[in-house]
Image (spheres, rainbow, N blue to C red):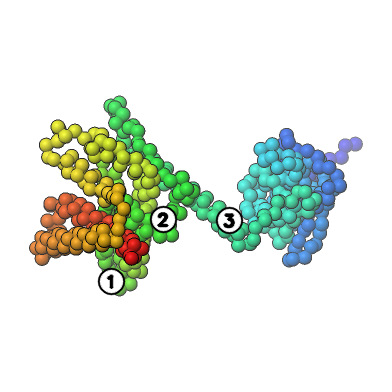
Amino acid sequence: LFQPEEEIHSPVERAAAESKISIAHPTLHYTPPPWASIPEPGQGYKLEVVKNGAIVDCIDLDLRKHETFVLIGRLANCDVVMDHPSISRYHCVLQYGEDPMDKTGKGWHIYDLGSTHGSKANKKKLPPKQYMRIRVGFVLQFRSTRVLSLLGPSSDCDAEWDLSPTEMMEKMHKKALEAKLAAAAKKEFEAEKAKEAESEGIDWGMNYGEDDAPVPDVELDPHLMEDHEQYYRADPKKALAKFFEREGFDMEFQLTEQGSGHTHKWLCTIELPIEVNGIDRAVTAQATVSTSKKDAQVQCALEACRILDAHGVLRRSANKTRTKNKDLEANDFYDDDDDEYLDRTGQIEKQREKRMMWAKNKTGEKAGKKSTYESLCKELEETRAAIADLKKTLEDLSKAKTAESTGDSLDDYCRQLNQGADAKSKTDISILRQKLVGLTHDAQRLEKLMKIAKP
């Protein structure tokens, strides 16, 4: 006779029955990649288990349950069983083979199976479900108190650096700095691109290509292209002074105090003469610091160098300047776009005179005859007299500029807003000071020549 199965009424009996049913392990959702291969036996690959600084176990990877990979997890059917609660049932896989994308030869690759707490190799967290090549000596961590170290043949070790610890630190620091600068440059480029897209708006199909005009290439010194900021990072004021001296302008910082007590700060600004597509533009660089005037000037100069370098004018090659000067001299110091017939203000002629003066100050007039001690003395006296005249002229211009002030700072400020700065006087003072610097250098050169030629 058929006897029905007895019903289980006791909770203990029910729990025991459920435990018997759940003995079957969950399915491992992992398929070896096409490049997987069976490791050759006898290579000596092992996993050394370290706990609290002591070796507690050594697992031979030749004694594995799968052909091409080693399974690490919390379940009993894993090759490496770890009982820590932070370990997933199927935590990660050590896959053997030769990844065609990596091209590092046959070896072990770690593959995290999307575990809850993740995996680490050499203290670096691994992305889930991505193969990473590991070599002999790599240290693996899985949020457990145990640490696994891969042992094996010396041919599978990383190549050692032939560098001292200091050089290694410098190389790593340089690599991190390059990555940081690249990320910052990419972020800045994306921000500028988004800003341009917002400013352009809708053109309603009436874009005639005015904004697509080709930008002239700026020739840069090749040996300065290794690092954009290396040229001016050490001494930004010196680099900025070279730029102003080359362009024929004065480097004048404007310092303003802000706040008082613990909120006291120095605001430093400077105007930069930048030529963009043949149009002179005044760009202001500024910096605010809470330490001293000197630091404010240094930070302002650094910001100015960055702006000039971004426009490609800070390190303009001297060859391009010489070529441009030769072209101007061949064209009687007229620019290619100058048309004297259409000019009714005399501005073109004034610019021509300035170009002639700058060319004369920069090149000088080389005498064809030999200099004697008497001629050098005479030339030095004339140069000193010219220096004295220039200093007197500059003092007169400075006094005249100061006399224009009404004494009321508010009225002066409003007058400057309404009338703007006197560009002509600034240009004249700049040219005179540039000429004064040139004459001072000539005087120093003549003094040295006199010492040599003295009988």
Q: Is mark 3 on a helix, strand or loop?
A: helix
Residue 197 x, y percent position in the rendering:
35, 37
Q: Which residue is drawn at 74% across and 45% down?
A: 108
Residue 232: mark: 2
Residue 105 x, y percent position in the rendering:
73, 41
Residue at image mark 3: 171
Nearer to us of marks 3 and 2 is 2
Q: Residue at x 54, y 55 (%)?
A: 174
Q: How crowded is mark 2: few (under 14 residues within 10 Å), some or many (20 or more)?
A: many
Alpha carbon separation for disc pair 3 and 2:
21 Å
Residue 260: mark: 1
Closer to the camera in the image, 396 or 260: 396
Q: First in sequence: mark 3 or mark 1?
A: 3
Q: Residue at x 71, y 61 (%)?
A: 145
**Left or right: 55 in relation to 240:** right
Q: First in sequence: mark 3 or mark 2?
A: 3
Residue 246 x, y percent position in the rendering:
32, 51
Residue 73 x, y percent position in the rendering:
74, 50
